[in-house]
Every structure is written in structure tokens, then in C-alpha cells.
Amino acid sequence: MTQSFGGRRLRSRDWFDNPDRMDMTALYLERFMNYGITPEELRSGKPIIGIAQSGSDLSPCNRIHIELAKRTRDGIRDAGGIPIEFPVHPIFENCRRPTAALDRNLLYLGLVELLNGYPIDGVVLTTGCDKTTPSQIMAASTVDIPAIVLSGGPMLDGWHEGELVGSGTVIWRSRRKLAAGEIDEEEFLERATGSAPSAGHCNSMGTASTMNAVAEALGLSLTGCAAIPAPYRERGQMAFRTGQRIVEMVRDDVKPSDILTREAFENAVSVVSVIGGSSNAQPHIQAMAAHAGVELETGVWQTHGYDLPLLVNMQPAGEYLGERFHRAGGVPSAMWELLSSGKLHGDCLTCTGKTMAENLDGRESRDREMIRTFDDPLMTNAGFMVLSGNLFDFGILKTSVISEEFRARYLSRPDEEGVFEARAIVFDGSDDYHHRINDPSLQIDEDCILVIRSSGVIGWPGSAEVVNMQPPDALIREGTQWLPTLGDGRQSGTSDSPSILNVSPESAVGGGLSWLRTGDTIRVNLNEGTCNAVVEQAEIDRRQSEEPAPEYPESNTPWEELFREKTGQLGEGGVMDFALKYRGTSRKLPRH
Ligand code: FES
Ligand code: MG
């Protein structure tokens, strides 16, 4: 007996409609899982909805999903689906060595196998910590079954002695205070723990908040989902409604390929720009687009984001944290500003079944301190700038975190505004940086640019969040909070450092940073979008042929080796190229 749902035969029926096997599979679900699913229920043709569980003790930013999944299951049941919860590879930014960036592509591979290999008709992707969002969206795109994103939400706002302290951002700021002798280690720790008062992901506009906003901007989560703080009542309600909605999406056959269009990705780039989002959104958006089969040139950050204003007043670019952002209207209100200024594609289809413009109707913010208008922004031209030159083909600069002091010092030369030259101090990875940054013989002063290499996809491996290097302690004590920095690694989305980063190609594959030497002059021209070492080509050729290339550590695990073999550069999203051809695997059922 073949059952249909929404007039179609669901893929799970292939597991259950086989007359020889039906009762075996049903028996498995009922008995071995002790799950209460009867053969009759399976015969009735209900869709099987996966809940990709990303929370665990190894993934504490997402642990709220262990509780939320109960509400999600209720929603799925309520709408007539059968929920099946299963774990995905855990990802946690803060403890994972050598870097959690190794895990995005690993979770991706694992989730593709689970979605493809089991009788799953649709899936709820439970997201939170930075890379848990792009990895799952990438997998859902490859398999291309109906999928919806349920964010876990940020922590409550952090406070320390009456001051808002945001995750990550407080660490970078307190490190400078510690180096300047303004606070001791005990206060450093109090400030750090104050920033993490509850369950949830980072409460600043770091990579986690950014990527959950991106999921919503792409049309993959219900309206208003991203910003609801994890402990809020509305978070559970959102889980319930998300569970209901995925069943309807299966009925209507709304797949990632219907939602993830070029226009949706342009919207995401624009949203990241006006919210002062993380520079890590660049490789992640690039990777999601690649897996969705959408061509997105690396210059899209310049063409669809750079000239946008900063509208959301959230740390690190602004003052506030996640709770106020949510109360001010969250992502829909920020998007409403874009839409009403003609800077958003309103006709994109979303997981609600409606267009983005329909979702945003009536979402204008009433908190103008938190979410600004185009006429009264926090900063103009506040998006990401794309740079290139003889040191690299692609690098990105988050302009919304460039402070007034920094602008005045480096970018306001009377003769040529937006241009500066600095003497390079080159470090080979973060150990080298930590060992030598306070070495007086380097004579680091305000005219220097700190450069870190061997920290990219291949060199680290994985690409590390190390580019936001702090100046030497002595310089901080004299009042220099930031030096320009440059590197082939990434930096935390919570950092307020004015860095040129995600530089591709990286030094480990022969990029320009490999021949750069301490003492070389680097010239940055923000008007032209260029960054060049002032070194003659003949000298570059000599160094490349005569001097040894910088070294990087050997692989330590099988996955590190495989990752290095298969993963591309950050500019293109750090994707495994070979995987891109597998888009739409659900259209071909796996053999029995
Ligand atoms: Fe997981 Fe920030 S460390 S969200
Ligand atoms: Mg991070």
C-alpha cells in the first residue's frame, strides 16, 4: 500500500512500503528504539521528521536544544509528523584544538550521510554556536530535503559592575586592560564570567548571532527566530511552531533549493553588513552558496554590503547585547530597514511559505537607540571591504569596528585620506606571536602592522582565529589600543580589531605572505581596495627561489590530513570542492 502526503510519495515510504521489509523497519523503530511508533502509524503515511541535535556537553552553546527538542517534537506531532532526534558532530568554538574550523566540514559530511541514509522526509536543524549553522545548512542543501533552522538563541545579557559585558568582546577588551595594568587577573575572570550568565550562544554580535541572523535572512527560519534569547519563554514557542512548520514544508515540498537563491544570499550579505556581523560570515556564506549551487563572487561583500550603514547597536561594533536586540525587533526589524530603503530582495520565498517582504510586514522597530534608520545610522559605509594586491588575491576588512581613534591615526592623512603605510612585523603562527610580541628588539611602534601567517586552512590546519593580535603591552600602556593587523587566519566575530583577514591564498600554499619579511613596508589603500608590500618584483622572485618557505605543523589526526587534502581557501569559503557535485542526493534513493 503506497501512502501519499501532500499528493506525493515521501522518500521514507521506500523504507516502509516494501512488502518484504515493512514490518522489519517498523519493528526496528518500535522495538529497538522503544519509541511507541506502531506499524499502523507508519503505514498511515505520516512524514518522518529528523531533529538534528547539535547540543551536548561538548557543544554547550547549543545545549538548550536538548530541552527545546521536546517542544519541537510536540510541534511535529501536533502537525501530524513523526519526530526522530539524532546527534550531529559537536562543535564548540572555545576548547576545540587546533580549531573548531576543522569541524564545520566534518559535521557537514556526517549530516549528509544521516539525512541521505535514513528514512527522513524533512529536518529541523538546531543551530547556535558559530559553525553549527553553516555546516547544517550546507548538508541540507546537498541532500535537498525540506529543512528549517531552529536557533537556540543567545545567552541573557552579561553584566559586570553595571556595565554590559558581551561574550568574547569583553575578553578582547579586558586583555588590553590587563596589559595596561588597569585590572588584575581576578577582575579579568569576573568580567569574563559575567558575560556568560545563562544557557545560550554568545550574546554579542559575534559569529553565532551573525550566522543565526544569516539563516533567518536566507529565509530558512521562522520570522524572529534568531534573536530570541535561549531562556525566554518565546524560545520554546518558537521550537513548537518550527516543529509544526517543517511538517507543512514536507507536505508542500519546500526544499532548500527553492529558498536558497542568489537573491537570498545577497540579502544575507546585506544583513550581515547592517548588523555589524562577524567576518566569519564571509567564508560561511560563500560555502553555503557553493553547496546550494549559487554562484557568489567574492566581491559580493563590496558590491552588496560595503556602502550600507551600521544600523544595529550591538557589541562589538556598538553598545548593546542580544536581549535588547530581540526586544527591539531582532533580525526582522533590521531587515525591515533594508526593505523599506530598497536594499533587500523582498520577493524571495522563505520557509514560512510566504515571501520575505510578507514576513517583514509590520516589523518596524520602535527602539531607535538599538535599531537605527538609514537616515540616522551609527556609521555610514560600514560594511565589509574586499582587498587585493601583491600579497593576496582576497582579503576582507570589517569596517564597522574601526574606531574613531584608529581612523584618525591611520586613515586621515591630510595628503591622502584612506591610505596608510606601515612596517610589517611578521609572525609564523600564534606561538611565535606570543613568544615575541613583547620582545623590545622588534621595536614595534605605532607605524607597524602586525602580520600573522601559517594560520590558514592548510597551515593551521583549519584556519585559526588569531589575526586580532594585540599590540605589545608597553604600547598599550602608552595608549595604543590597536595596531593594524593582517593575516591568513580568521578572527573571532566578537573582536573589535581592525584587521585584514581571511587572506587567500594563504602562506602555506605559496601566497604572498610567505615571502613577506619583517621590516617590509605595506601600503594599504582603502579607496582602491588594495594592500601591497612595497617590494620590487625581482626581490620577491629572489626570496621565493632562494629562501625557505615558512613551516607549518604536520597533521595530527586522519581528519586533519584529509581536510588539508580536500579543503579550499577561505576566500572561496573553505569548501571541499569534490562535494559540490552531490547536490540533490535525495532525488536518488540510496540502494537497499
Ligand atoms: Fe559558542 Fe560563542 S563560543 S557561541
Ligand atoms: Mg568564533
Image (spheres, rainbow, N blue to C red):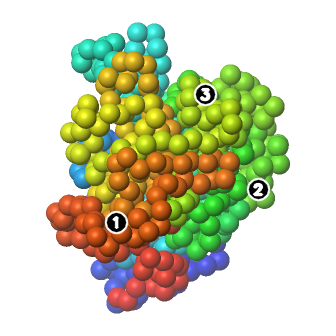
- Say which mark, if any, is on residue 543: 1
Nearest the viewer among 39 and 230 is 230
- Residue at mark 3: 408
Q: Amino acid at mark 1?
A: Arg
N-terminal-most mark, 2 or 3: 2
**Which residue shows up at 68% across the image and 32% down it?**
414
Foreground mark, 1 or 3, reads: 1
Q: Amino acid at mark 2?
A: His
Q: Secondary structure at mark 3?
A: helix
The answer to whether residue 441 shows anywhere in this view is yes
**Which residue shows up at 35% across the image and 88% down it?**
592
Q: CA distance from mark 1 to mark 2?
A: 48 Å
Q: Position of residue 481 (x, y in %)?
A: 44, 26
Q: CA distance from mark 2 to mark 3?
A: 36 Å
Neighbor class of circle 3 (other Cα within 10 Å; few <14, some 14-19, many 20+) is few
On the rendered structure, is 282 left or right of 505?
Answer: right
Q: CA distance from mark 1 to mark 3?
A: 35 Å
Q: Position of residue 477 (x, y in %)?
A: 36, 18
- The answer to whether 369 is drawn above or below residue 565 in the figure is above
The answer to whether residue 73 shows anywhere in this view is no
Say whether marks 1 and 3 touch (CB < 8 Å).
Answer: no
Nearest the viewer among 382 and 241 is 382
On the rendered structure, is 154 left or right of 107?
Answer: right
- Residue at mark 2: 345
Q: Position of residue 273 (x, y in %)?
A: 63, 45
Q: Secondary structure at mark 1?
A: helix
